Amino acid sequence: MIDNELFNKVSKNYEEFLLSFNSPRFTMLREAQKYILQQYSATYARQPNVAIELPTGAGKSLISLLIGEAWRQAGKKVAILTANKTLARQMFRESESLGIPAVLMEGRGTEIPSRDKRAYHRSNRIAIMNYWVYYNQNPVLDPADLLIMDDAHLAEHCLHSLYSVEINKQLHESLFESIISEMARLFPEYHIFHDALDEDAPATTPPELLSFIDQISYTTRLRELGDSFAGLETTDRDFKFSWNRIRTSLQEANIYIGLQSIWIRPYIYPLEENSQWTDTTQRLYMSATIGNPSDLGRRLGTRNVQKIPLPPGLAEATNGRRLIVMNRIEDADIPRRLQGAIYKALEIHPKSIWLCSSKAEAAAFRNAVSAWLNGRGMTGHPTWILTSLGDEIEQFKAAECGHLFVAGRFDGMDFAAGECRLVVLATLPRAINLQEEFICAYLRDSAFMSRRLNQRVVQALGRCNREEDDYGIYVLADRRFATHFGRESSRNGISKNIVAEIDMAEDATEIAEVELARKIETFMQGDFTHYDAEFTEYLRDAPSLAREAQDEDISNDEILAWTALFHNKNYPVAAQYFERCYMFAQQKGIVELGAYYGWCWAKATYLNGLQGNEVDLSRGLELFEQAISRGGQSSWFNRMRSSLNRARRTTTDITHLGENNATAILQQFDEVLESLGGRGNRFQRWVDRNRSRLESQSHNEFQEGLEELGRLLGYRASRPRHGAATDCRWRGIFGNVKEVITFEAKIEHNIQGDITPAMVGQAHNQLQRAIGEFGNQGYVVRGTIVTHLASIDAAADSSAGNVRIIPKEAILALWEKIIALLIRYRQSWSLDNINQRRIAAGEIRPSLPPDRWLATALDENVRWIDAELLLQQWR
C-alpha cells in the first residue's frame, strides 16, 4: 500500500516537473498527457494497479518517464518494461532527450554489467528493458517499487514462456507424433487427433481442449514422454526450460490440441504469485487499447486494475492519415483486386508489414508473398519473421526494401515517416493462439473475445502513424473484415476518426480496380487533396466514441480460482471460486462460457476427490455432467460425454465417440452465418456461388463445391494434395461411427458414354489410399464416383466391387436439402444471442439426418445411389 509520505512525493504538478528538465525536445504536455497526469497525481498514485490508455502516438512514453522519475527521486526503484529491444532502446533515447537518468539492460542476466544493476537497485537510474529481462526463471534484478509495463498486453507473450509449454509439430516432431498417435487410440472421439495426423486436414480445424478426466489418466505417460524428449541433447533450450517448469502441474493445466501444436498452460497465468510482480508497490499498465481492464487482468493474471478514464474528445485523437483498403465478402482472401492495390503501394514504397494470427500463417504468407513478388519482377527483397525479442524490427527499418511478417502481435512496433507505409492485416485477428481459437470456436458468448478483436485492429491501424504528418495504407485482406464491420455493434470501442476511415473503406469496395490503384498512387505520393475532402465528409457522419461498458468483475474470481488450482494446488479454494463464476454466468444468462466455468468447477472438485475425498470424486463427475448439459449446443461439450462415460465405467453409450451428425451440422451452420452475417445479400451470393460450382462441368469448380458441401454436412472435407489433386474426401466421427468417403468426379462435358474400367480404377486408387491412411485408426472407408453419366459398361461394373456411383443430380438434391434447412435456421438465428441460437436449432433439429445416414445409403446393395436413396433417412 502506498503511504502518505510516498504519495506526497510522487503526486506532483507534472507540467512544472516537465519544465524543470529544460529539455529542448519535450517542452510542454499535450492535453491528453496533462489530463492523465493530473488524474494520476490527484487519485491514482495511491492505487496498486493502474491502467493508462492513450491513442497510438499520443505520448505514453513521456508519461511513463515523468511518473518513473518522480518515484526515482523519492528513492524508489523504477523499471520500465517494453515488448522488445527496439522499443526499449527507443524509450532509453527518450529518457536521454528528457534528461532523466536511465540505464538500458539487454541480454541474459549474466551479461548485464554490475554497475548498471547497482544504479537501478540504489535508485540512481531508471532501468529500461524488455519483459524477458525482468520476468525470468532466475531473476538477477530486485523487484521494482514502481513497475511500468509498456504495451501491457504484450507481457502475455513473456508469460507464455514462464508458465506454458508448446509441443510443436515441426520443432518437436517425434514427441508431437507420439502424443497425438497415442491419444488418438485412447480417446477416439476427438476429431483433432485424426486431423493432426491427416496431411490434408482443413487448416481451419479449431483446436480442442482435452477433458480433464482424459488429461489426468494420461498425465503419467505424458510426463514420461516429455521428460525423455527434454533429456535429449538435441532438444532446444527453450523447450527444456518450459517443460521443467510445468511438468509438475500437468494435471492442473489445460491441454489444448491443434493441428500443428500441443499447448499446455493454465487458462489464467499466476502472475500474482511471481515475486517480480508481488514485491512491487505499484504497477502501471500502458497501452493504446486497454479496453476493459478486467480482461487485461484475465490475460495477465492480475486483479483489481483501475483504469484512468479519459474523456471521449481526448480518447478519439489519432495521428496522421490512414487509407484503409478492405476486401469484399464475396472475394477470396487477397484476390486480384487487393493484389493490385498492394503491388501499386509497393511500387512507390517497397516495404510492407504483414500481421498474421499465428507462426504457421506468418511463414505461409512469407513464402507466398515472396513467390508472388518474384513473379511480378520485384526480386531480391529481404524478408523477416519477427521473433519474441524483436531484433528483426531494426533490420527492417534500416532496409531500403523488404517485408516483415509478424505472428500474433499487433502493437509493440513503431514505424515513423518513411520506415514503412504499408500494413497488411492478413487475417481477421479473432484469435492469436490455441486457447483463443478454442474459446472462439466453442465458447461463443465470451464477450471479451470480440473486444480483443477490435483492440487488435486499432493497434494495427497505428503502426505507421506515429506523428501528425505520418500516413500509411492499411489493407484488411480477410473478407471477414467486411462482415465484422458491417455490423454497427462491432465498432464498439473504436474512435470516431477510425470509424470514418472504415466507412470510406467499405464504400471503396465498390469502385473499379483502376480507380482504387489511382487512389493508392495519389495517397502514397503525398497528395491528400481528395483524401482530406472525402475524409471530412465521412467524419461528419461518424458517431462519437461511446464509453465502453464495463464487465462486472468476475475476472477477479477467475484469477483467484486459477491461481489456487494451478499454482497452489489448493483444489477446494479453486472449486469455491469456480462455483462463483458458474453461478454468475447462470444469473447473467451466459451459456457456453458459463458451461466452461462449470467444467473448471468439476475439474477442481474431481482433483480434490483424487486426494482421497470420495464425495468430491463423485461430485466432480456430477458437475461435469451438469456442465456438458449446459453447453450442449457447442459440439465440444457433446464430445465430453465419452470422457464422462469412461470415468464412470458405464456400458451404456460407452462407445459414443463424438457429437451426433445433427450437432456437427448446426456447428457448421453457425460458422457459415458468423462469416456471412445473418442479414443482407452476402448469404445468397454464397449460396448461388456454391450451387454454381456443383452445377459446373469444370473439375476444379465442382470439387470446390463438393468440399463446401461436405463441410456444411459436418464432415472434415478436403481435396488431398498428393497425386490425385482433383478428388475430394469427407471424414467424420458421429456417434459411434468413424467414416471416410472418397469421391472421384467425372463431370466434364467432354466425358461421354459409359463409366469405364479406368474410371473405376481411379476410384479404387482413392479408396485404397484412404484405407491405408485411416483404416488402422478404426475408420470405415467407402468409395464413390460422382458423375453425369447414366450407365456403366459391364467390365467396369464387374470390377467396381463396393464402389458406389452417385449421379450429379443427387449431389445437387443434397445441396438443396441442406441449404433449405440453413435458410430456415438463419431466419431465427442471432449472432449475439446464444439462447436464440438454441431456439433456432430446436426448430430444425428434427429435420436433420441421424448418424450413419450417408453410410447407410452407401451400404445399400446397389450400384447407383440416386437422390431418393441418398436422402432416404432425411426427415
Image (spheres, rainbow, N blue to C red):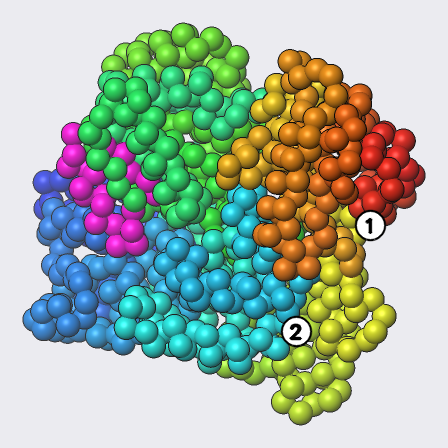
Q: Is residue 570 left or right of residue 754?
A: left
Range of residues picked out in magenta? 386-406
* Amino acid beneath label 2: Ile
Q: Quadrant of the N terminus?
A: bottom left
Residue at the spot 73% in from the left edge and 25% down from the top edge? 755
- Above or below for 300 versus 279: above
* Amino acid beneath label 1: Asp
Q: Quadrant of the C terminus?
A: top right
- Above or below for 215 versus 693: below
Residue at the spot 49% in from the left edge and 31% down from the top edge? 478
Foreground pick, 430 / 743:
743
Residue 118 position, x and y percent, is 12, 73
Residue 396 position, x and y percent, is 21, 38
Q: Distance of mark 2 from mark 1, alpha carbons? A: 26 Å
Q: Earlier in the sequence, mark 2 or mark 1?
A: 2
Residue at the spot 28% in from the left edge and 73% down from the top edge? 233
Q: Residue 808, located in which quarter of the rendered image?
A: top right
Q: For the residues carrying marks 2 and 1, which lies nearer the camera in this image? A: 1
* The disc label shown at residue 851, or none: 1
Residue at the spot 72% in from the left edge and 83% down from the top edge? 617
Foreground pick, 814 / 27:
814
Q: Is residue 225 left or right of residue 398?
A: right
* The disc label shown at residue 213, or none: 2
* The disc label shown at residue 57, or none: none
Is residue 390 highlighted in magenta? yes
**Other-residue count near label 2 (Cα within 10 Å), few / some / many at <14 / 14–19 / ≥20:** many
Label 2's element?
A: helix
- Above or below for 325 versus 552: above
